[in-house]
Amino acid sequence: MSTPSTTTPLVALDDASRSFGAVRALQNASLALRAGEVRALMGENGAGKSTLVKILTGVDRPNSGTVLVDGEPVVFHSTADSRDAGVAVILQEPTLFPDLSVAENVVMGRHPKRSFGRVDRPAMKKTVQGLLDRLGVDLDPDRPVQGLSIADQQIVEIAKAMSFDARVLIMDEPTAALSGREVERLFGVVRALQERGAAVLFISHRLEEVYEIASVVTVMRDGEVVHDGPLSELPEDELVRRMVGRDVTQLFPKSEPKIGEVVLDVKGLSREGVFYDVDLQVRAGEIVALAGLVGAGRSEVVQAIFGVDRATEGTVTMLGNDLPLGKPTAAVAAGMALVPEDRRQQGLVMDMSIGQNATLARLGDMRSRGLLSPKRERAEAERWGERLQLKYGRLGDAVGTLSGGNQQKVVLAKWLGTEPRLLIIDEPTRGIDVGTKSEVHRIIDELAGQGLAVLMVSSELPEVLGMADRVLVMFEGRVTAELSRAEADEERIVRAATGRVSAPATQEIA
Amino acid sequence: MSTPTTSPAPAGPGGLAPKIAAEEEARVSAGRRFIDRLIRARELGLLVVLALIVIVTGVIEPNFLDADSLKQTVLNVAIIAVMTAGMTLVIVTRNIDLSVGSILGLSAFVCGDFLTKNPDVPWPVGVVIAVVIGAACGLLNGVLVTWGRVPALVVTLGTMYALRGVAFLVTDGRQINAEDLPDSFLTAGSGDLLGIPTLIVVALLVIALFWFVARDYAWGRQLYAIGSSGRSGGQAAKLAGLKSDRRVTQAFVISGALAGLGGAMFAARYGTVDATAGQGYELRVIGAAVVGGVAIAGGSGSVLGAALGAVVLGTIQTALIVLKIDDFWQQAIVGLLIIVAIALDRLIAKQSEALLRQRSARRRTAA
């Protein structure tokens, strides 16, 4: 399947696999970066792209398989090793030194020297000014990075990568924060690098950018490389199909919903610079999914609805009552529950026991004569443990000892105990093994069957398609499509999630 | 409704763009000047505060302005200032060294003991011994912090007590007195070099050296980078290929070595050393660094500023004694000063951050 080519790739990955516990993030993946070639790396979230980038940049090492530089097998022990091999990387999230100047950020680790080994500040400034001029941006090399917008920080990262004179440039969604003009400039730089014989690996979710800049493409799905070839031979539709193309088996035995009154009604919700003009309704017994790519603003929307983040505009109404924005306590009192994306950081207190975690959201009910009653805690935790089929040793064990799926059940127990009317659940099955996944799905389905309104954020298409009665798709902070269960299919969702709104069902919203 | 901020701004009509650019230029350079002023303000501000203290105290109690009185004041500061230079390097990497007072005590005694027992050996050997002991203690701190992945606060709290314990073991209840020490050593401690007291010359050399190293050498800049990236998990330092563990350990070794040097200076100046020498110095040193503008969260502050912080704190303490102010008030005033310094830091940081943000926002809309 690979492109026939006579040249030795500058950097290549040969048959590499990487597992994290039971999760196989990368399976027998091969990829070659050749001089003068811009290769796109495409795939859904969790397809294994980041793992591949980490291996190529020396952040992580494969369990099996090899990294080749100029055809010779090497082991990158650190980013310094990969850099010495001529690999530069621009990550999605800028990683800079906030207290230091723009110029110093670019040259850190490779300061130019003058007499007595002193740092040559004028030379440093001149070099960096030159790089910024080539990028066509007006950024003062002497100012500290602190206070720069994400886009400007990304530009500093790009200048840094350029300053290496890299033979291989890896860009992991470098354009996510850039404006159209800045993207054009970046592409100008990429083309110049290409002409000088550098190899570029370009990761982006914006299809038009990929077609504009790349000539070859590697498509990944579920940790495997599923396609490798010239981009010109792969029409957009076909590319999207290969990215998602798996059989959506009926993993989830979804029951027929009994949809009731409107529980949550959100109108015109905006948060400046994050998301705009979001309207959504969730009815009793209904499961609504917020689909889209990472960074589309979905988690931010649900956090604003719950009041963790403050929305700048719009209204949130629960069962006919307007809620004050930015007040989670009011949201909880009105019957909302939020199961966050990051269980370990936001959902659980890892060092506390299973029983304590399961009852943490309603300490008031656990009281007996003013003190917390361990007996009552235990009884409640046992009741929910049984209902959710929680697998645990003892209720007194630290919650950190449980598997991911069982941890998620503890978070669910914690919130379900408050008897909510609306359950907001962000990435319900992230990091959960396949077996427990369907159990979590069954629980959510059961809860909806009992009349609970469910708003679910999910990046996994099979989960969205299998669970949701209605799907809202977001792209760059806006809802780009609203699809009924009948209308929703992988292609429509992926199209809307990548900003190409063409499905007829979306016309009324766009 | 409003467009997302990431979309390109429409290009303005041809005639307007240069004008906007020119205005922008003016605004940016004004902003830049303001930032520069803020950065320099710390050192200048400390000098102003220092002048005020000296003048006010001098007016109330003219004796304070005697050449001898001023000399004593500065001499008292010299040891603290030397240790503050080392502490600054450690704090800049987002660590802290609580053990410097104990290191001073241990090395002062060992140095004094050695010179007492070997009166024929030239005294600089004693100084070298003190510095080596300090550096060894610093190495222990650095290794525990970097290899052990234990927070510096905990490690150096431990070594602070442990090394003080070692000092008690070594002294075994003894005390070194001035009459036991070689005269040459004591003369060096109280004597002059080119008309300037030797201890002050030593302090000035140490401060100048580490000020330059931290400011103008890649090694020093990396310390700032390590501290600055530590706030967000250290990823940036890792990606830049910096050897963070080695640099942090080196900073601890220098802090320890300078505390050892401080020990030798202590022995030479006071002549009397027992196991409790230097107790509480660690907090005076950290206080001086903080007052001098070294951010406790790492990544910013200069050795010069920290040294000025030491001078200001030391001068205030002497001034309060000269003015016969109650001992309790002396402590309260020093504490208040540290809090004011930190509050001032936050205020400046917030303001300059807001200003920088504004500038980049303007630039984007003008682009």
Image (tube, coloured by chain):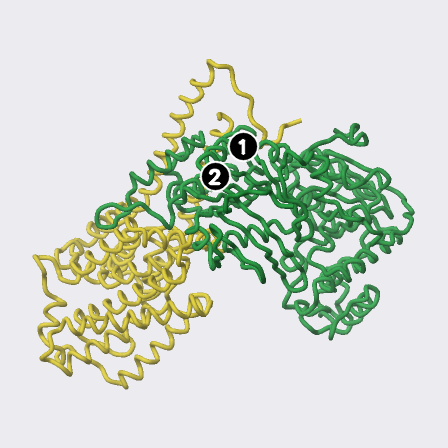
Between B27 and A442, the one lying in front of the other is A442
Q: Is residue A144 above or below residue B72?
A: above
Quadrant of the snapshot with the C terminus of chain A: top right
Residue under numbered circle 1: A183
Give the left or right position of residue B243, taking residue A437 as reference: left
**Sequence-first tag of 2 and 1:** 2
Dividing the picture into quarters, in which one does residue B105 lie? bottom left
Rendered location of residue B270, percent (x, y): 18, 71
Q: Secondary structure at mark 1?
A: helix
Task: From the top left corner, tell me how far across and down residue A256 is, in percent.
Answer: 91, 49
Q: Return the residue at label 2.
A: A148
Q: Residues within 10 Å of mark 2 (few under 14, many from 20)?
A: many
User: Residue A445 vs residue B64: left or right?
Assistant: right
Instruction: Say the numbered circle drawn on residue B289.
Output: none
Specify the subunit that label 1 lies on: A
Q: Are marks 2 and 1 on the same chain?
A: yes
Seen in the picture, residue B95 relative to B275 is either above or below; the reply is: above
Question: On what subunit does the disc labeled 2 rest?
Answer: A
SS at mark 2 in the image: loop
Q: Which chain is yellow?
A: B
Residue drawn at point x = 43 percent, y = 18 percent: B18
Of the chain colours in the picture, the one used for chain A is green
Amino acid carrying label 1: it is Val
Residue placed most toward the observer, A85 or A103 = A85
Percent from the top left, x then y, of residue A250?
85, 52
